[in-house]
Amino acid sequence: MGYETRVTGMITVDPPFTAPEIRHIKTLGIHGDVKLRIAEQSADTEYGEMISRTGKGIIPAHEGAWSYYYLAEDITKIIDGVAGLAGAPDHRYGGHLKCVGEDGDISRVVIRDGTVVAETPKLLWPDGTEEEM
């Protein structure tokens, strides 16, 4: 058993991942620390009900505490894997995944200019001095 972290939040995807992109993501060898938040829309057609699925975001794959050793690597595989697809739209990413470790340390994972970045907070004292946490 390793160090456990609680991860919450969502990295949003705009425009959402399409069905071909979702199928491609499943082939990328993700370790399983994240998954896609899938949205379904249904429409009646002359042939019956059609269901459309899109990937609205990237979310933690586990509820509660888990050993998220590959969190940033899994997100990077998704971002880079989709960016390399021919004909894929340019996606914009927002939001973040907040990480709280079992000893109380806090960080978050964001995407800045197409790169996955892990950030740690800084303490700002009233006199304006900063301190790493």
Image: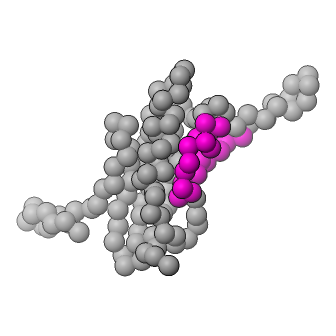
| Magenta-span inclusion, residue 32 | yes
From this view, report whether residue 66 is shown above or below residue 10: below
| Magenta-span inclusion, residue 84 | no
**Position in image of residue 37 (x %, y %):** 61, 48
Q: Horizontal placement of 130 versus 61: left or right?
A: left
Using the rendered image of the protein, determine whether residue 60 is visible from the camera's viewpoint: no
Q: Which quadrant would residue 124 be assigned to in this image?
A: bottom left
Q: Which quadrant would residue 102 be assigned to in this image?
A: bottom left
Q: Residue at x 34, y 71 (%)?
A: 105
Q: Residue at x 65, y 37 (%)?
A: 23
**Position in image of residue 38 (x %, y %):** 65, 44
**Position in image of residue 127 (x %, y %):** 8, 65
Q: Horizontal placement of 116 versus 84: left or right?
A: left
Q: Nearer the viewer, residue 95 or 28?
A: 28
Q: Residue at x 42, y 53 (%)?
A: 72
Q: Residue at x 91, y 25 (%)?
A: 47
**Position in image of residue 19 (x %, y %):** 66, 33
Using the rendered image of the protein, determine whether residue 125 is visible from the camera's viewpoint: yes
Q: Nearer the viewer, residue 86 or 96?
A: 86
Which image quarter is the C terminus in? bottom left
Q: Which residues are magenta?
A: 22-40
Q: Horizontal placement of 86 versus 125: left or right?
A: right
Q: Horizontal placement of 50 versus 84: left or right?
A: right
How many numbered marks appear?
A: 0
